[in-house]
Image (spheres, rainbow, N blue to C red):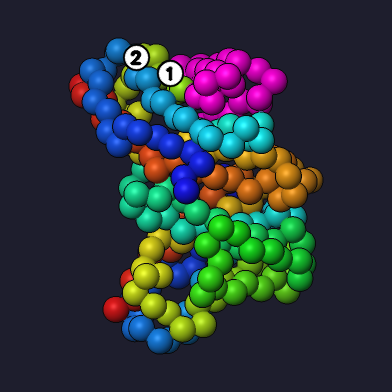
């Protein structure tokens, strides 16, 4: 059963506007969350993370919000740029043992110039 | 750049043949991981290693074995490849001293089993 879910397989946004990517999880033991970006024929690239002790983390144009009561996190990209077009994966870890990550199925973001 | 290379980058093989994929890192990271990526599943952990000769199973380990005889190399072996193992395989490392750290990924190996 998928413990991390990304229910929107794709999203299209105009350049300059905000992109919001969503992620839900079911395991209450998860305490560390990450977003990765992936271009075709490349490995996932780490984007931003958040610990469960926080509800927001910001890095330049990227902000991740965590709502623990709803078991929901979101990634905001403002302003969106054409180079942001990629597949975005949400991942979660319970930080036990070797920090195994559980990934969502990904959302393909297309930023339209 | 986490200094990870994977080889081969592409491989086509036939059902029943053994296949070994290699992950090589140059920065002495302790933790290394093998994932597979499939449509509709995201990335799923196959096996991981927390040191030389120390390995453990992940979520989808059936049909796979691993070995780590030196820090820099983590090998993934399909003893007898099946069509269900057609996938893109990614190696990852953590840069921290423990497993509780951000994972960084290699470029991937696309494996096709005919």
Residue at the disc numbered 1: A76
Above or below, A100 relative to B60: above
Q: Is residue A85 visible?
A: no
| Rendered image: mark on residue A18 | 2
The foreground one among A72 and A34 is A72
Quadrant of the frame with the C terminus of chain B: bottom left
Picture quadrant of residue B68? bottom right
Q: Residues within 10 Å of mark 1 (few under 14, many from 20)?
A: some
Work out which residue is located at the far left of the displayed protein and give it: A113
From the viewer's perspective, tell me whether residue B53 is left or right of residue A91: right
| Rendered image: mark on residue B111 | none
Chain of the residue under the numbered disc 1 shown in the image: A
Q: Is residue B21 magenta?
A: no
Picture quadrant of residue B82? bottom left
Identify which residue is drawn at 58% across, 53% down.
B92
Above or below, B110 relative to A36: below
The spot of residue A90 in percent (x, y) is: 48, 35
Q: Which residues are magenta?
A: A47-73
From the viewer's perspective, tell me whether residue A18 is left or right of residue A65: left
Chain of the residue under the numbered disc 2 shown in the image: A
Identify which residue is drawn at 73% across, 44% down.
A96
Q: Is residue A66 magenta?
A: yes
The secondary structure that dominates the magenta segment is strand
Name the element at disc 2.
Answer: loop
Identify which residue is drawn at 32% across, 32% down.
A8
């Amino acid at each position: 059963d998928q413990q991390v879910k990304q229910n929107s397989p794709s999203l299209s946004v105009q350049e300059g506007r905000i992109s919001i990517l969503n992620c839900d999880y079911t395991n209450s033991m998860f305490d560390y969350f990450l977003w990765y970006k992936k271009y075709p024929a490349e490995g996932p690239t780490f984007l931003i993370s958040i610990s469960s002790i926080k509800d927001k983390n910001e890095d330049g144009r990227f902000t991740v919000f965590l709502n623990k009561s709803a078991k929901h996190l979101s990634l905001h990209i403002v302003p969106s740029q054409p180079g942001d077009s990629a597949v975005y994966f949400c991942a979660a870890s319970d930080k036990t043992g070797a920090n195994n990550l559980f990934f969502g199925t990904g959302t393909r973001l297309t930023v339209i110039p | 750049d986490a200094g990870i290379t994977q080889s081969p980058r592409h491989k086509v093989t036939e059902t029943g043949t053994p296949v070994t994929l290699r992950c090589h890192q140059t920065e002495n990271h302790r933790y290394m991981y093998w994932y597979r990526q499939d449509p509709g599943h995201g990335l799923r952990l196959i096996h991981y290693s927390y040191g030389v000769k120390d390995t453990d199973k992940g979520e989808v380990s059936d049909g796979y074995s691993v070995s780590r005889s030196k820090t820099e190399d983590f090998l993934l072996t399909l003893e007898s490849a099946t069509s269900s193992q057609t996938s893109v395989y990614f190696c990852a490392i953590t840069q921290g001293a423990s497993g509780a750290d951000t994972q960084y990924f290699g470029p991937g190996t696309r494996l096709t089993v005919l």
